[in-house]
Image (cartoon, helix red, strand yellow):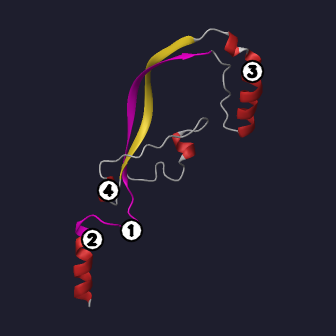
Amino acid sequence: MLKSTLYLLLPSLVAGAYIPHAKPICRDFNLHVNAAAQNWDLPAYPNDTDVKTLVRYLTKTIPESGFAQKPKRTVSGIFKIAATYCEPVNRVAEREGTIQLLLHGFGYSRVSYYPCCHRNFSK
């Protein structure tokens, strides 16, 4: 019985199938992006992720600034975007060569949006 079980498991292990409780190996890196945009000068956003602060900014601070009547200005530069790439532990043939890109929303950082995952891996 044990011998036949090993013969059944061996192809799965060799093929890189499911490995329970394994953690991906992740690497941090920076992307340097050259970008330009036409922007209005909006009032400074307070360094706050509270929903009430965001709603107040969007509904009161911005409209009262009269930004839409002001001319736009070009903002450009080379911007550094921090990224993390995690090599999958479990291979899926149909998804080989695919990278999943996850972006956090406005008012978040990569650490605050993905607290379960950031820095819990080996590098």
For the N terminus, which image quadrant?
bottom left
| Disc 2 to disc 4, C-alpha distance | 16 Å
Q: Earlier in the sequence, mark 3 or mark 1?
A: 1
Q: Is residue 46 above or below residue 74?
A: below
Q: Residues within 10 Å of mark 1 (few under 14, many from 20)?
A: few
Q: Where is residue 111 shown, x and y percent of the image?
A: 53, 43
Q: Which residue is mark 1?
A: 20
Which mark identifies residue 69? none
| Disc 2 to disc 1, C-alpha distance | 13 Å
Which residue of the protein is positioned furthest toward the front in this rendering? Answer: 94
Which mark identifies residue 63? 3
Q: Residues within 10 Å of mark 2 (few under 14, many from 20)?
A: few
Q: Which residue is mark 4?
A: 94
| Disc 4 to disc 3, C-alpha distance | 49 Å
The three-letter code of the residue at mark 1 reads Pro
Instruction: Specify start and end residues of the magenta stretch as a single range.
Output: 12-40
- Image-based side of 24 in relation to 67, left or right: left
The three-letter code of the residue at mark 2 reads Ser
SS of the residue under disc 2: helix
Q: Where is residue 87 shown, x and y percent of the image?
A: 34, 51
SS of the residue under disc 3: helix
The three-letter code of the residue at mark 4 reads Glu
Q: Nearer the viewer, residue 72 or 28?
A: 72
| Disc 4 to disc 1, C-alpha distance | 20 Å
